[in-house]
Amino acid sequence: MLKLLHLSFLPKSASFGLLILRLSVGLSMLLLHGRGKLMNFSATAAKFPALFGLSSSVNASLAVFAEVVCSALLILGLFTRFASLMLAITMSTAFFIVHKMALTGEHSGELALVYLFAYVTLLFTGAGKFSVDRA
């Protein structure tokens, strides 16, 4: 019974876990967030806040770079720590500034916080052995 509770029949592989994490957060960010911003860039830029002394279109461009290019790098496991850092900065901005740290309600930043935790994890761990970085 303890063997079943410990799930010891499953192989232990931190690298496989990192691959699943990279693929899940990379693909979901790219397809569910970045692609829409890229495809409708003018509408996105018009709604984006002007932060850090940068125009709304510059901030939108930086977000698209992170959410599209860096997500693709993350999926491949190429320059993983750089890509994770760029995505963590983007999600920090989204959570702390745009969503004002709200975890509930209509303008909740809960998803941005979950992504932030995943990207910080990958920033510290790297891609694992199933990656272009390792090859």
Image: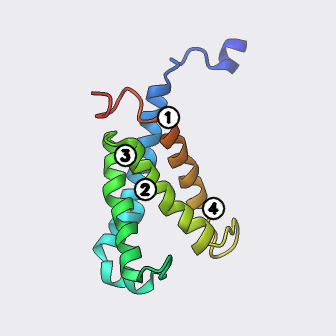
The one of 118 and 39 positioned closer to us in this rendering: 118
Which residue is the site of mark 2? 86
Query: Mark 2: which secondary structure?
Result: helix
Quote the CA–CA distance across marks 1 and 3. 13 Å
Q: Which mark is residue 38?
A: none
Quick one: label 3 or label 2, which is nearer the N terminus? 3
Quick one: label 1 or label 3, which is nearer the N terminus? 3
Q: Amino acid at mark 3?
A: Leu
Quote the CA–CA distance across marks 1 and 2. 15 Å
Q: Visible in this render: residue 1? A: no
Q: Along the horizontal axis of the image, is 92 left or right of 48?
A: right
Quick one: label 4 or label 2, which is nearer the N terminus? 2
Percent across and percent down for residue 123 are: 49, 43
Quote the CA–CA distance across marks 4 and 1. 23 Å
> Badge 4, how many Cα within 10 Å: few under 14, some, many 20+?
some
Q: Which mark is residue 110?
A: 4
The one of 111 and 100 positioned closer to us in this rendering: 100
Q: Amino acid at mark 4?
A: Glu
Q: Along the horizontal axis of the image, is 77 left or right of 92?
A: left
Q: Amino acid at mark 1?
A: Thr
Quick one: label 4 or label 1, which is nearer the N terminus? 4
Q: Are marks 1 and 2 in contact (CB under 8 Å)?
A: no
Which residue is the site of mark 3? 74
Image quadrant holding the N terminus, namely top right
Above or below, 16 relative to 107: above
Above or below, 96 relative to 40: above
Which residue is the site of mark 1? 125
What residue lies at 31% left-to-right and 83% top-to-bottom?
42
Q: Are marks 4 and 1 in contact (CB under 8 Å)?
A: no
Query: Mark 3: which secondary structure?
Result: helix
Quote the CA–CA distance across marks 4 and 2. 19 Å
Between disc 4 and disc 2, the foreground one is 2
